[in-house]
Image (spheres, helix red, strand yellow):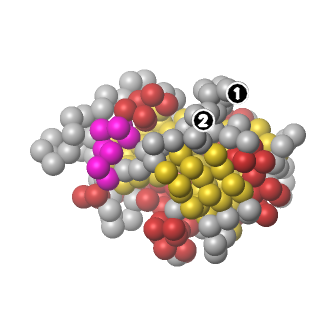
Amino acid sequence: MNAMFPARTVVPDFRLVETLTLGTLGNSPLAPALGAARDRLCAELVARGVTPILCESWPVLEALNSRHRADWFPLLPKPSSAPAFWLGLVDGEGEVIATHGVVLVDCTASSFGARLADLSALHDPGDASADEWAFVASEAAHDTRGSVAWIVAGWTRPDWRGAGLFHRLGELVRLVALARWNPKWVVGLVDPETVPVWSGRGGGRRRLEERPGILYHQSGVGRLPLHLMRWSRAAVALDLEIIPHMATT
């Protein structure tokens, strides 16, 4: 292991993404197209020297984040009751060198913007710190209702940055979220420094707000200005080249 980096975080009970069954949509007419898109993305990543894995354990992701705090912002909190998983890329030495996580948020009764503002998208009732708050001026956030897959924990280890992994892993995590949960929306919160990363073609058919319409004060971190980023279900399908198949479902 490279001495520049902390000791390995063991990933228990992980699964290879290329062997996954495709969840809710696995028995639908979309399954062959989803499987083909999954296989294409996995093959691209393997050709670049990494293997995509899926892990259900959020504490393992938190431990990984803690070990790499020098080059990775603290994770946003999530309600303990919220369904979630994360994907990682593992190098030839067995080290996780990139991640994307996703949390399922039910915004049927209350919009994603409202759930951010009252912190219920981040915490179970009563768990928020006294100094924690969020101000949400984003119209798109308040218009986002229904089942929402919230992408979090996007990280690539510094020595692997620039290798073309980040957007491929992001596309793969959106695929798995679509297959598992078939959400109406996929969203992300982007800090201003990362906006250029998402502004190119690699981010897919997403809407990325030009201005940070969300201000979140995270306990122990401070104020975070954040841009809302959003994909519709159809946009995810278009990026995965499965939209013709969706027309038949």
Q: Is residue 2 magenta?
A: no
Q: Quadrant of residue 24?
A: top right
Residue kind at label 1, given as amino acid type: Pro
Give the residue displayed 24% in from the left and 58% down from the top: 159
By secondary structure, the bulk of the magenta-drawn segment is best described as helix
Q: Nearer the viewer, mark 1 or mark 2?
A: 2
Give the residue displayed 49% in from the left and 31% down from the top: 58
Residue occupying the far right of the picture: 109
Measure the alpha-carbon separation of dots 1 and 2: 13 Å
Query: Disc 2 designates what residue?
Result: 130
Q: Quadrant of the N terminus?
A: top left
Give the residue displayed 40% in from the left and 59% down from the top: 165
The magenta-colored residue range is 64-71
Q: Secondary structure at mark 1?
A: loop
Q: Quadrant of residue 79?
A: top right
Give the residue displayed 62% in from the left and 58% down from the top: 215
**For residue 172, above or below residue 127:** below
Residue occupying the far front of the picture: 130
From the top left corner, tell me how far across and down residue 31 is, in percent: 68, 44
Residue kind at label 2, given as amino acid type: Ala
Is there any visible trace of residue 47 in the rendered image? yes
Which is nearer the eye, 110 or 1? Answer: 110
Q: Earlier in the sequence, mark 1 or mark 2?
A: 1
- Asked whether the residues under the numbered discs 1 and 2 touch, taking CB atoms below 8 Å apart as contact, a structural biologist would say no
Query: Disc 1 designates what residue?
Result: 125
**For residue 27, above or below residue 2:** above
